[in-house]
Image (cartoon, rainbow, N blue to C red):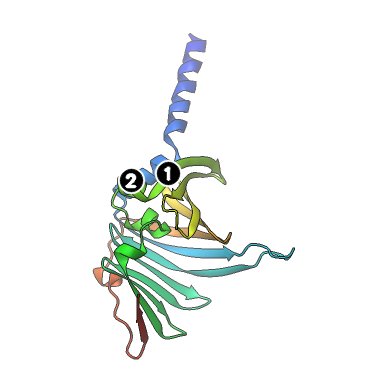
Amino acid sequence: MKNRLIAIILLAACAVSAGATGLNDLENFVKTVKTGHADFTQVVTSPAKDGQVPRAKTSSGTFEFSRPSRFRFVYKKPFEQSIVADGQTLWLYDVDLNQVTARKQAQALGSTPAALIAAAPDLRALQADFTLTDAPDQDGLQWVLATPKAKDSSLQSVRVGFKDGALAVLEMLDSFGQKSTMRFSAFQANAPLDAAHFQFKPPQGADVIRQ
């Protein structure tokens, strides 16, 4: 009887473990989290050249989204920049340069990290652009590996890390070997957000480039 009880406990533990995968976390995140707000810190590391130490640049700011097609990254340090997707247009505003770049959102997103965490309406939509697989647990997080299907993608791969089902880390490796790691904190799921946050009007006098 005792051995049978131990076996039942072990089977139950295995079932819980099997359910707690990064892919399941991603599917649940896309399905149930319709809006979100978080702070982020991003570290971009360039590959080492000629035996030199890799260079790293750190920036920080805030991130919010309203699924399926609106999001906003606001970089506050070290330079002010905004990336706003309003559902039709993707806007990039560089405060120092007083320059705005506008692109059609449908053409700009596709196989991008933003599509993974903010823009896609469901997992099926993501699977049209990415090959999604579970990656080994690491640093107390459950991971998903997303590989772009497009041969001309500027990304090699993206890893998304979840902590207890909440978005925690986004790691991006581009075709030049540059790695970007974005860590999220104070994440608020399904937070009420003002629709005006996802609207953008070029500041007066700014140079606007449409692509």
Q: Quadrant of residue 208?
A: bottom left
Count the numbered circles shown: 2
Picture coordinates of residue 22 (x, y %)? 45, 42
* Kind of residue at disc 1: Leu
* Kind of residue at disc 2: Leu
Residue 132 has which mark? Answer: 1
Of pointers 1 and 2, the one earlier in the residue sequence = 2
Residue 109, relative to residue 101: is it above or below? above
Residue ID at (43%, 27%): 15
Label 1 with label 2: CB-CB less than 8 Å: yes
Q: Name the secondary structure under disc 2.
A: helix
Picture coordinates of residue 135 (x, y %)? 51, 41
**In the foreground, 99 or 151:** 151
State the residue lying farthest toward the right: 51
Q: Name the secondary structure under disc 1.
A: strand
The residue at which mark 2 appears reads as: 123
